[in-house]
Amino acid sequence: MSNPHRLYAITHSLYSGRARSYLIKHQIAFQELSTGHESFKAEVLPKGKLATIPTLVTPEGEVIRDGAAIIEHFEATNGRPSQPRGPRQRIISALFDVIGTDGLLRPAMHYRWNFPEDNLAFVRYHFLHSQRDTPERAEKTEAMMDRMRYAAMIFGVTEHSQDVVESLYLDYLDALNAHFEQYPYLLGWRPSVGDFGLIAPMYAHLGRDPHPAKLMQQRAVSVHRWVERMNRADQDVPEFFNAGTEFIDDDEVPESLMAVLRVLAEDFVPETLAAAESINGWLAENKPETGAPAVGRLAQARGTATFALRGQTIEALAQPHRFYLLQRVQDDYASLSETEKAAVDAVLSKSGMTAILDAALNRRIERADNLEVWV
């Protein structure tokens, strides 16, 4: 493997799983390194701007920070092999990308941090070994883990919300399992951008940490097989005896996938609407300058979104990154013909997702010099 791409990532990182899966599936040669390597601080961080993962360094030395940008880099270069051509499948694929990277953080964080008897030793090992072996390593590990436990709370996982987070996740897991009993990927016989977004929480947290992995293996075998499949370079579909190779014909979105979306809509839609209202209020009050960071630790602090979920009030951090990704869905929809819009409308209506088309911020977010910034 001569001069491969370098992927700075960590095995237990939610967002790393998205980029790693894409590189594996598209057979792009890469070497994975931890951010603890000196090269990250010395060579990568000045260009990446934020010490976040995943960050990719190309053989030519270009630095690309963030999983969405990494995937877009290869998709744009190679004719968009993971983007369905039909408008319905394309919109649904992009929607799953948003849901995977921003809409499933609560179950991901809950099932990692609230089952320490099963998970703690496993998770501590990975946090510990993501850093250099220094005298301060153990202390830094505990500090990092404490920050992530706190992040679980600000994403809306509290002792009051745990039951509803679990009930919704189990319903989603059952629906997703029923779909993957029929198809190996979300939209047929090859992974879409939506598959790569969804694998983010479904691998490192929910499909790999001991407690949720056991739950998935025992309750949703077909989902667990998809998690395995998404980390294999081949198609990996021996249990399907009449497997195809492409997305489902005729731009079809099967009922089994709409059933998954209906469950997800219970959480994703009200949170998205509440977050848009919260962030728009913040924008009106603070009026950030054009080019100011909108995402990450360089951005100004924002508020929370409060919404109802199955009779439980949830308060969670309102995250602009969700809307940066959601813009892609809305922009694609806006570009469609009236006939195509009607076809997409029917799918979104049946899946309970119609409202996401209008859940927008009053300012756009674009990427500039490896940062997501206000326009």
Image: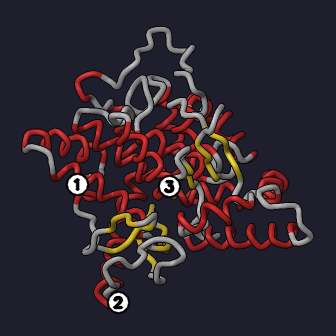
Q: Residue furthest top?
A: 241
User: Of residues 64 and 302, which is closer to you in this image?
Assistant: 64
67 in relation to 251, above or below: below
Distance CA(mark 2)–CA(mark 3): 29 Å
The answer for how far apart the CA atoms under marks 1 and 2 are is: 26 Å
Which residue position holds label 1? 331
Residue 23 visible here? yes
Q: Which mark is residue 294?
A: none
Q: Residue at x 42, y 46 (%)?
A: 73
Q: Earlier in the sequence, mark 3 or mark 1?
A: 3
- Whole-percent x and y of residue 321? 42, 65
Point out the tag, 2 or 3, that comes first from the N-terminus: 3
The answer to the question of whether label 2 and label 3 lie on touching residues, with beta carbons closer than 8 A, is: no
Q: Indicate left or right for 344 with 256 as reference.
A: left
Tell me the residue that label 3 is attached to: 64
The foreground one among 310 and 44 is 44
Residue 121's spot in the image, x, y percent?
Answer: 85, 54
Q: Give residue 286's mark.
A: 2
**Contact check, label 3 and label 1, Cβ < 8 Å:** no
| Res. 224 in view | no
Identify the secondary structure beneath mark 1.
Answer: helix
Give the quadrant of the C terminus.
bottom left
The disc labelled 2 sits on which kind of residue? Asn
Secondary structure beneath disc 2?
helix
